[in-house]
Amino acid sequence: MRHLRMLTATLALCLPVMAPAHDVWVSPDYRIEFGHPAEVPEAYPLERLMTVRLLDAQGRELLYAHDRKDGMTHLMPAGEPVMALLHYDNGYYTENLAAGGYERGRQADIAEPGKTRRFVKFGKTLFGWSAIADRPQGLPLEIVPLADPAGLTDGAPLPVQVLQAGQALSGVTVLRDVPGHEAQAETDAAGKATIAYDPAMAQLYTVRHEAAGIETEVAGIGLASALYLHARP
C-alpha cells in the first residue's frame, strides 16, 4: 500500500485567507472531493494533495492504497477509519492589474502583476464518533466538534471550537455550507461557537482566515478549513 506524501509540520504551520470558496472532504466511499456540496465535485491534480491521514477509533493511523478515477483520488483503507485529515495546497494566485481580478500563477507568470496570495485548505471528515473526535488533531486551522452529534436533541445546535496552530481563534465566522440550510456563527474569545445541525443530511462547516505571507512576493496566505459530518443512518 502507498501513502500520499506528507508535508512537514514546519511548512504546514507557516501557511495562512482570501481563498476561493472551495473546500475538501472525503465521501462515504472514501473519495476525496473538492468543490462545493451543492455541485458536482471537481477534478484536481494529485500533487495538490499534500497530506492524507486516516485514523481509527483509537487515533491510530491507518495505511491505505489509493487510485485515481475521474480526476479524483479514491482511498482504500486497511481498516475502518473514523476520521480523515486532509491538507490541500491550492497554489498561488496573482492579481492581474491589466485585466483585473486574480489569475493562477506567480508574479513572473503575469505581465502586469499586483499582489500574490497563496491558498491552502485543510479538511477533517468524521465517519463516526469516537474518543478522538473532540480532540484537536494539529491542523494549522481546525474546526473541532465539542459534542457527539448523536447525543444532540432534535434541533439543537452543534458546539464547535476553531483553533489556529492549536490556539483559540476568536472573531471568525463559522459557516454551515448545506444547500438550502446555510447558517453562520461567530467564535467567542475562546474560539467557540454553536451552529445549526441536522442529522438527516451531511453537514459541511467551514472557516477562513487570512495570515501574513512568509515569502517575499506573497502578500498573504488564505487558510481555509472544513469539518464534514456524514448524515446519520
Image (cartoon, rainbow, N blue to C red):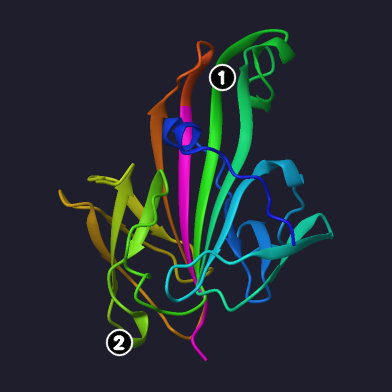
Q: Based on the picture, tell me whether residue 222 belongs to the magenta stretch.
A: yes
Helix, strand or loop: magenta stretch: strand
Give left or right: position of 182 versus 171.
right
| Dot 1 alpha-carbon crowd within 10 angstroms: few under 14, some 14 to 19, many 20 or more | many
Picture disc at residue 215:
none
What residue appears at the point 33 percent right and 50 percent down from the top-left corner?
173
The amino acid type found where label 1 is placed reads: Thr
Q: Which element is circle 1 on?
A: strand
Q: Which residues are magenta?
A: 221-233
Image height of 128 relative to 154, above or below: above
Contact between labelled residues 1 and 2, with CB atoms less than 8 Å apart: no
Image height of 51 relative to 29, above or below: above
Image height of 151 relative to 70, above or below: below
Q: Based on the picture, tell me whether residue 226 belongs to the magenta stretch.
A: yes
Q: Nearer the viewer, residue 83 or 200?
A: 83
Q: Quadrant of the N terminus?
A: bottom right
Q: Nearer the viewer, residue 161 or 115?
A: 161
Image height of 148 relative to 65, above or below: below
What residue appears at the point 33 percent right and 42 percent down from the top-left corner?
165
The image quarter in which residue 140 lies:
top left
The amino acid type found where label 2 is placed reads: Gly
Residue 101 appears in view: no
- The residue that label 1 is drawn on is 116
